Amino acid sequence: MPAGVRHARPEDVPDVLRLIRGLADYEREPDAVETTEDDLQRWVFGDDPVANVLVAESAPGGPVVGMALWFRTYSTWTGVPGIYLEDLYVDPQARGTGLGKALLAALARIAVDRGYRRVEWAVLDWNTPSIEFYESLGACPMQEWSTYRLTGEALTELGRTD
């Protein structure tokens, strides 16, 4: 694992939630976060975890200033798992220190060590600094794909279909 990066522990949940809220602010959606500390404890550290979190510390044992929340995917075309990066965020005062790259490098190492073939994520089209950062690491946009989401009443109604 790159210096300053480690697997999150249950006691990191308040920091992880703070970083999720920081990302929501950055993405111009400050009121969109419904996640609670209990949600993170259940879904990341509970009996049936569905996500994983890497955290970045400003110094070993120091404050948590960044995180990468991810989960495993599976490609029917390659026949191999991959990683979906749900959130990557570094506190503004810690940007430019290499922690964002360290988080992505740690995630890439997990993928390679496990025999996975990809790490993928979404980025808002107006987020030029992040796009430039990702492309500087060799990431490529998948311009031919559009993301769809089913939520709320549409999800409920479809779920009731016989």
Image (cartoon, rainbow, N blue to C red):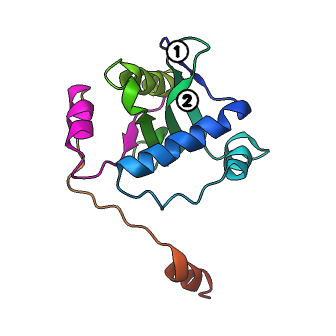
Q: Residue at x 38, y 44 (%)?
A: 121
- Does residue 36 appear left or right of residue 126 in this picture? right
Residue 116 locus on image (x, y percent): 47, 32
What residue does disc 2 label?
54
CA separation in Å, label 2 and label 1: 10 Å
Q: Let me know if residue 97 appears in the view.
A: yes
155 magenta-colored = no
- Disc 1 secondary structure class: loop
Q: Residue at x 27, y 38 (%)?
A: 130
In front: 42, or 25? Answer: 25
Whether label 2 touches label 1, CB < 8 Å: yes
Q: Which amino acid, by three-letter code, is at mark 2? A: Leu
Residue 10 locus on image (x, y percent): 72, 34
Q: Which residues are magenta?
A: 115-137
The answer to which quarter of the image holds residue 23 is top left
In front: 146, or 12? Answer: 12
- Pick out the residue farthest to the right: 47
Residue 158 locus on image (x, y percent): 54, 82
Q: Say above or below: 129 vs 151.
A: above
What residue does disc 1 label?
1
Query: Which quadrant of the figure contains the C terminus?
Result: bottom right
In front: 39, or 155? Answer: 39
